[in-house]
Amino acid sequence: QVQLVESGGGSVQAGGSLRLSCAASVDTYNTGCMGWLRQAPGKEREGVATIDGGSSTTYADSAKGRFTISGDNAKNTLYLQMNSLKPEDTATYYCVAGFPPICSVAYWRFFRFWGQGTQVTVSS
């Protein structure tokens, strides 16, 4: 059974930090490519970060230097550490998994499995 359950969202002031977690079923965690997407009201969905089985990562330009994606294989859990948050980071964040042609934020449309999303709100 495919299952992705996010947690860790919330409200924070600009400059603050949050860590998102995604508990994944074993089958989902072993897809080989997992990541985080986000969607803000009125905006298109955006790939934020991805990580593959070899721990190679990609980031959206907007996330580079501020966000870090990581995984804990023992816990089948994916994380997104977000630092120096900005109001424009406000969005619903989704944990995703699947089989994109390349494990990259550029291929976010190919992620087959999605969590329910967790809201992140950054105030100025």
Image (spheres, helix red, strand yellow):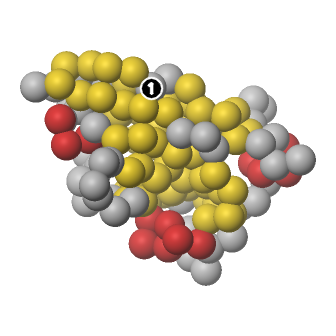
The residue nearer to you, when weighing 59 against 24, is 24
| Label 1 environment density (alpha carbons within 10 Å; few <14, some 14–19, many ≥20) | some
Is 15 positioned to the left or the right of 6 in the image? left
Above or below, 32 relative to 67:
below
Q: Which residue appears farthest toward the left when viewing the image?
A: 124
Instruction: State the residue at coordinates (75%, 48%).
Output: 29
Residue located farthest toward the right when viewing the structure as drawn:
1
- Furthest-bottom residue in this view: 101
- Could one spot residue 5 in this view of the protein? yes
Of residue 108 and residue 32, the one placed in the foreground of this image is 108
Image quadrant for the C terminus?
top left
Between 7 and 99, which is closer to the camera in this rendering?
A: 7
Location of residue 4 in the rendering, given as x and y in whole percent from the top left corner? 70, 41
Report x, y in % for residue 82.
35, 33
The kind of residue tagged 1 is Gly
Give left or right: position of 15 versus 55. Answer: left
Report the residue at 67% width, 34% height from top.
5
Residue 98's image quarter? bottom right
Task: Tell me if residue 72 can be seen.
Answer: no
Residue that numbered label 1 is attached to:
9
> At numbered mark 1, what does the secondary structure look like: helix, strand or loop?
loop
Residue at horizontal 68 percent and vertical 64 percent from the top: 112
Q: Identify which residue is drawn at 34% across, 62% down.
A: 44
User: Quick check: 62 above or below 72?
Assistant: below
The picture places residue 30, in percent across and down from the top left corner, at 79, 54
Is 75 placed above or below 55 here?
above
Q: Give the image location of residue 2, x and y in percent.
A: 81, 49
84 sits to left or right of 119: left
Report the label total: 1
